[in-house]
Image (spheres, coloured by chain):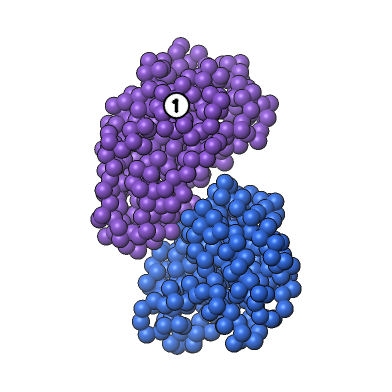
Amino acid sequence: MRDNKIGMRTSTAESDTVRLLYRYIIEAKRYDARRLLRDEVERSGYDETLQGVLEPTLSMIGERWAVDCISLAQGFVAGKVAEDFLDIREKPASGSARDASVRSDASQAYDASQASGIPRRIAVLGNVEDDFHSLGRSLVVSFLRLEGWTVVDLGNDVPAGAFADAAADSGASVIGASAMMLATARRAYDIRQELVRKGLSDSVMLALGGAAFSMKPELAGELGGDGTARNALEAPALFERLRLRSGRLATGPSR
Amino acid sequence: MTPAERVGAALSGARTDRRPFALTLSLYGSRLLGRGASGYYSDPAVYASGQRSVVDLCGPDIVFGPFAFALEAEAFGAVAERPPRSPPTVRRPAYGSPEDAEAVAPPDVEADPRLRYLVESVRAVAEDQRGRRPVAAPIVAPCDLPVLLLGMEAWIETILFEPRLAEAWWRVAAGHFAALGSAYFAAGASVLVMPVMLANPAILQPEMAERLVLPQLSEALSRLPGPVIFHHGGNRVAPQAGRFASLPNVGGLLVDERDSLAAVRRAVGPSVPILGNISGPHFSSRTAEDLSSRAERLINDREDDPRFILASSGADVPYETDPRTLVSVRRAMEELG
C-alpha cells in the first residue's frame, strides 16, 4: 500500500518540472500540463512521475487551496490534469478512457478488488438526491483514483438507498456524498439511516462534502457523517482515514 | 425626506436626515402575508402585497422585486422546485451539454409566464410605491446564467477550454440579460441588483476573469438602459472592487460581510456608492440586539462616508427570521440618524 500523498506537505524539493506543472495548472494550460506529464512518463515511468511530479504539485495546490489562494477554476484544472494523467496510464496512445474507467459500475469495482486480494480502497460517490452540482464530486473522483481507489461513481441525484446498495455490492469502505445547498444536504441523513437499516454502519464510513459542508463543517456530524474535507484535494486523506476506521474485512459483498 | 430622496441624496454624496438602509426581504413578504412561498412566486399582486407588508414592518428605504433566479432558469427549461419557505431553486439544469448552445431558444420576456411574473411583480411593487421608494430588481448575471442552465462544472470547463462554445453561450446569456433588464426598467425598476459569481477571485482568478469573463460582462452591461448594483455573489469582492466598479452602468457595489468597508472604499474611490454588509442569511440566527449593534458599528465606521448605504449582504433574509430583529434594525437606523 502506498501512503496517501495528496493534500500532505511533501518533503521533496520542488523541482523545475514540479514548478512548471504548477504554473500550467494555475494558468489553466491543461494541454501543456498533459504534454509535460506524458513526456515525464516516457522518460521516468508512470509511478516515478506520479510520486515525483504530480503528487508534489497537487500538494502545493492543496496547501494554497486550504488558505483560499487557489480559485475554484484552478482546483478544477488540477482535477482535469489528474484525470488526464490517469488517461495516460489507461489509454496511453490516444483518446480518453474516462467514461470507461471512472464510471465503472459496482460489479466491476468488486471484481477489481477481488482480483487484487488487498484490503479495499473502494469508494462509492454521488451527489445526494435532488442535487445536481457535480463539480466537487468529479474532482474528488479524479483525486481518489489517482491515489489508487476504485470509485463507483453514481452521478447526480442519487437516492439514499442507492448509495447503501452500491456500497454493499462493491464492498466499499467509504461512501462520499456531496451536496451544495443546505436544503439538499439534509438528504445525507437519509443515507445514514439506510446504512443503519442495512447493518452497514460499522463497515461503511460516510464522508460528506460540498459547499453546504465547507461553509458549516459541523453539519457533517449533525447529519450522521463520519467526516468532511475542506476541499477536493483533501478528500483522499479523509477517505484513507475513514477506510482505516471502517474495520471492514477483506471479504465479498455483504449480500 | 422620503426614502427615495434619502437614497438619491446618499448616492450623490449629499446630506441625508438619516442613513438609508436596504434589507433583502423579497422572500420575507410571504411570511408576513402568512402564506407559503409557492403562490407568492406566481402572482405579482400577491408579491406586491408582501412587499407592502415589509414596508409596514420595518420601512426599508429600498424595496425589491422577486429574488427568484430559478424562475429565469425555468424559463429556459430548467426544472425548478418550489419549497414552502424558500425561493424557488433549480432542481435540474435545462441542458445536458455545452454543445446544446446553438439550439437554445431564449425565452420571450413578454410571453414566458415566469419572466412575465418577474417583470409584472416589479411593476406592481413600483406602482404601489409611486416613486416613494426605489425598486431594485434582482437579475442573474450573464456570466452566471449558464451555471443555472448547464451546471457549474460544465460552464467552467466550457469557459476554460471551449472558447467557441463559450461564445455561443455568451450570446444567449447577454441577449436574455439585456431583454429582461430593459423590461425591468420599463416596468419601473430604479436599479438592477446583479450577484456575480464567475468573475469573483474565489471562483476565477483575476487574470482569467479579465480575459474570459469581464469583456463579455462589460459588453452585456453596456446594453442596459439603467444602473446596476454589482452584488458580491457570496464571496468577498474587496480585492477586485475597483475593477468591478469600473464596469459600464455599475452604480454601486454590494459587498460581503467579510469584506472590509474601508478596503472597498479605498479600492473604488470616493464617488462609488457602497452597500452592505450584514449577512442576510444570518438574520435568522442573530438576535435583535446583535443586529442593532452591528448596524451601529457599521454606521459609526462609515461616519465620514456619505455614499454608504447599510444593507443586508448575500441572499434573502430567511423566512424563519424573527420580525423583531428586522424592527431592531429600523430602530437602530432611526436612533443613529
Q: Residue at 52%, 40% (x, y): give it.
A: B83
Give above or below for A4 relative to B325.
below
Res B192 seen here: no
Chain painted in purple in the figure: B
Chain bearing mark 1: B
A221 sits to left or right of B276:
right
- Residue B94 placed where, x, y %? 37, 51
Res B38 seen here: yes
Q: Quadrant of the C terminus of chain B?
A: top right
Amino acid type, residue under disc 1 in the picture: Tyr
- Residue B17 placed where, x, y %? 50, 13
Give above or below for B88 relative to A132.
above
Chain painted in blue in the figure: A
Disc 1 on helix, strand or loop?
A: helix
Q: Nearer the viewer, residue B9 or B175?
A: B175
B194 sits to left or right of A167:
left
Please identify the quarter of the rendering in which residue A229 is found: bottom right
Q: Residue at 53%, 24% (x, y): give it.
A: B33
Please identify the quarter of the rendering in which residue B164 is found: bottom left
Q: Residue at 57%, 46% (x, y): give it.
A: A183
B155 sits to left or right of A130:
left
- Residue A239 placed where, x, y %? 64, 68
How many C-alpha atoms fall within 10 Å of the one at disc 1: few (<14), some, or many (≥20)? many
- Residue B133 placed where, x, y %? 42, 19
Q: Which residue is mark 1?
A: B47
Q: Nearer the viewer, residue A40 or A97?
A: A97
Q: Residue lying furthest front in this view?
A: A255
Q: Residue at 36%, 37% (x, y): give it.
A: B114
